[in-house]
Structures are given as C-alpha cells and as structure tokens.
Amino acid sequence: MSDEDFHILAIDPEGQRHKVPALEGWTLMEILRDAGLPIKAECGGACSCATCHVYIDREWLDKMRRKSIDEDDMLFDQAFKVDEERSRLSCQILFSSEINGLKLTIAESPKI
Amino acid sequence: MVSMVKTHVAIIGAGPVGLFAVFELGLLDIETHVIDVLPKVGGQCAELYPDKPIYDIPAIPKISGQELTDQLMEQIKPFKPEFHLGHVVEELQELDDGFLIKTDQGLSLEAKLVVIAAGGGRFTPKKPPIQGIEDFEGSSVFYALKDRSVVKDKSVVIAGGGDSALDWALELYPETKDLTVVHRREEFRAAPHSVQNLKALEAEGKIKIIIGDIIDIKGEDGQLSSVSVRPKHDRDQLIDIDCHLLMPFYGLTMTLGPIAQWGLNLERDLIPVDTEKFETSAQGIFAIGDINHYPGKLKLILSGFHESALMAQAAFKYIFPDKKLRFQYTTASSSLQKKLGVRE
C-alpha cells in the first residue's frame, strides 16, 4: 500500500465527517492541522496544553498504544468532557499503517 | 490607580520575541515598555513548557523554556525595560505623534511606536462547560482573585489539581468558612510539597478533597449556593456541596482578544506584515513573532528574533528621523559595548 492510500476519518465538533490523508510518522494532531481541521494545538505538540483533545472510536481502542503519564496528566487537569477510555491528545499519537483508517472525533475547543 | 507613562516603544507581549525586541531596540537607544497579561515574563515558554527542552535555538543545543526566558532577561538587563505584567491592553488609540495604550489595570502609556509580539494571543483561563456558569462569573465564580477578602467566612470550592488550584487552596483556606478541592482523579499534578501540604490539611480536617467532576451549579442572582459533583467512583451518585465561591483552574488557552478591535488587517487571527520592516497595515504598528504572517512565515522563535532585528532598524527611522542609522557589530563597536555595560 502506498502512502497516498493512508487516511484517517475525522469528525469535527460540528459532526461533519472528513477523510483526511495521513502520513506515517506524523502525529494525529499534525495530520488534522495540516488538513485545516479545527484543532488548536496551542503548545505545538509538547503535551502541555490539552487543546488537541480527540475521542478515538471504540473499535480502534485496542490498536492504540497506552497513554504516557504526561498525557494522562494533561487530559485530567486541563481537558473537558474527558472520556476515560476514548479521550486522547492527538499530538501524542503517531500515525502508522496499523491504524490506517482510524476514526476519531475532535473535541470542542474550551470556552473562553 | 491611573498612571500616565511616555516612552519610545510599547511592546505588547513579554515572550521570547518581545524580550529580544527590547535588546535590538535598546542597541539603537530606543526605550521600551513591555506589557503582558501573564504575571510573569516568558510567554508560552514560561507558561506552557518551562521545563521542556528547546533544541533549535542557534548555538544553544538544548535549553528549557524557563532557561531561555532567564537568559533573555539577563541579556536585556542593560536596557532597563519597564514591565507591566498582569495587564491586558484594552485600547489602542492613534495620536498625532504616536499611540495611546490603555490597559485593564488603569495604565495609560503614550508611545511613538507599538510592537505587537503577542504570540498566540492573550492567555486566558479555560472555562469549564458547566451550564449557566457565565451568570456567576465575577460575583461567585473567579478564575483569579484580586480582593481576597471576598472569601472570608464563605464556603469555597476550588476545582483542579495543578499548581494554581493548590496554591490558591493553601493560601485561602484559613480565611474561609470551609474549603473543598474538587479534582477529577486521585493524583495531583501540582508540585510535590504543595500536594503534601494539601494532604496534611485534609488529614487535619481543614480542607476537604473530593475526587469527581463538577457537573452543575446552583444559585440565584449571581450568587452561588451549591455545586453538584459526580464522584469518580460512583457515577450514579451526585454530591451537593455548599458553595458561595467557585474557583476553577483547568489551565489557560489563548485568544486574540482586543487586538481584533484595533482596526488592523487580519488574516485568520494573524497580522499580515511586510518582510522588510515587519510593519502592519497601520503605520507605526509592527508585529513580530508567532502573531504575524507573511509568505514563507515559520512560527519559530528564531524567526521572531530575526524579525525583531529588522523591525528595530525601521523603528529607529521613526524615533530619530534626523539621525543617520549606523550599522554596527557588538563584537567591534565600543559604543554598543558601552550600552551593554561591558566596556567603560
């Protein structure tokens, strides 16, 4: 399978579905941002702001690597509407062929 | 308190790029005042990743956000910039000969030029998605406290598990009627000594800790009476806690804020500039660092440093129109070395 066939399916906070081209070695946050989807990712991927929060679809959960302590810290301390099973920070997940076709939903940005 | 200050250049934003602008302007004898919403300097570097290493500062293989901030402060010391921290610039008015800046803390600053180095915008607290919370903000819900006497003999709830939450809890509890910390899990991310103090106070019965999520608030006419917490380990239950004052601490996020109202051209919340002077659509207002945009722009600290140097050259021509700008190296110029305090 060539790189061009890799993709993820992202549902934005408004419920719109997007099929987004994905590249191995990119983080999910970078893939979503590159596609122009609404992901703030304020700290630029340093696991320091929790503004790249996504919900992974249940059917993909067993393919995901475990969260680091840092990622867990940020989700619990700074994200809202956290789902203990499905919530992840998209800057902490590298795309690879094993998760080709991954489905996720982008969390709403925090209110200001 | 209203105070009026005059200066050459007002720099909005005390992140690395704003700080380095002080240096580049200072070398050209241009005085600066720096304004930032945060109570400390360093911007994102100090607020979001103080301990995380940065690897792409030229000639510095590895430096943390806080160290970079500290080094910049050391570097700009000879120029004695004035800092106005904890201020939000609310208004920017054009005068005949410069600009008038007004902050939410009552500062009025008259400057010949303005440099916007505001990065991703103004840091502001994340507001929890609790129905109706806006109705209580400023009267019963606070994201920071200026007047601590408002907690006296009140039931106070502090939400969060980081340093801000714990610092406020430890500081305020003696004044309150009772204080409860609500956090979503058993582990606290705050500094270990703060967590120890909190646990000790809980053991003494002086602070309550509830592990769960605030999902509802109740009250009337802006005055809270209780909050409802769903405990982490019993999702079907709801605990009502007496609460006159709620302080949520879920970190900060960034927003463009009042800059959007200053009449500048904007493109997707960024300020377009030219790449010679880094001037905005308004003459005398410059934008440098992450907040600006031009073809080929890269949001890197190093780009902001370059932009500072070129902006300073342009600023000189406005501030000292009759003087000839002399390009000098710090290695060779005795006059620059005198300014830096390294030569008598």
Image: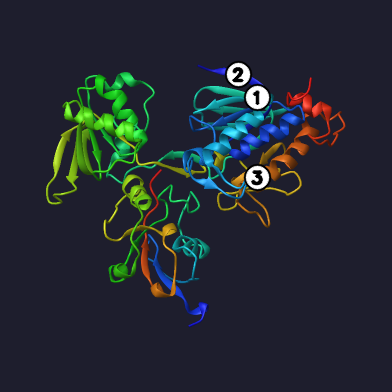
Mark 2 belongs to which amino acid? Met
Q: Which mark is residue B110?
A: 1
Q: Earlier in the sequence, mark 3 or mark 2?
A: 2
Residue at figure coordinates x 22%, y 27% from the top left: B201
Q: Position of residue B311 (x, y in %)?
A: 73, 40
Q: Give the residue at mark 3.
A: B304
**Crowd tier of the residue under label 3, counting other residues whose Cα lies within 10 Å: few below 14, some 14–19, many 20 or above:** many
**Crowd tier of the residue under label 1, counting other residues whose Cα lies within 10 Å: few below 14, some 14–19, many 20 or above:** many
Q: Are marks 1 and 2 in contact (CB under 8 Å)?
A: yes
Q: Decide which of B43, B238 is in the foreground and name it.
A: B43
Residue at figure coordinates x 83%, y 35% from the top left: B328
Q: Give the residue at mark 2.
A: B4
Give the structural element (helix, strand or loop) at label 1: strand
Q: Earlier in the sequence, mark 1 or mark 2?
A: 2
C-alpha span from label 3 to label 1: 25 Å
Residue B102 position (above or below residue A63)? above
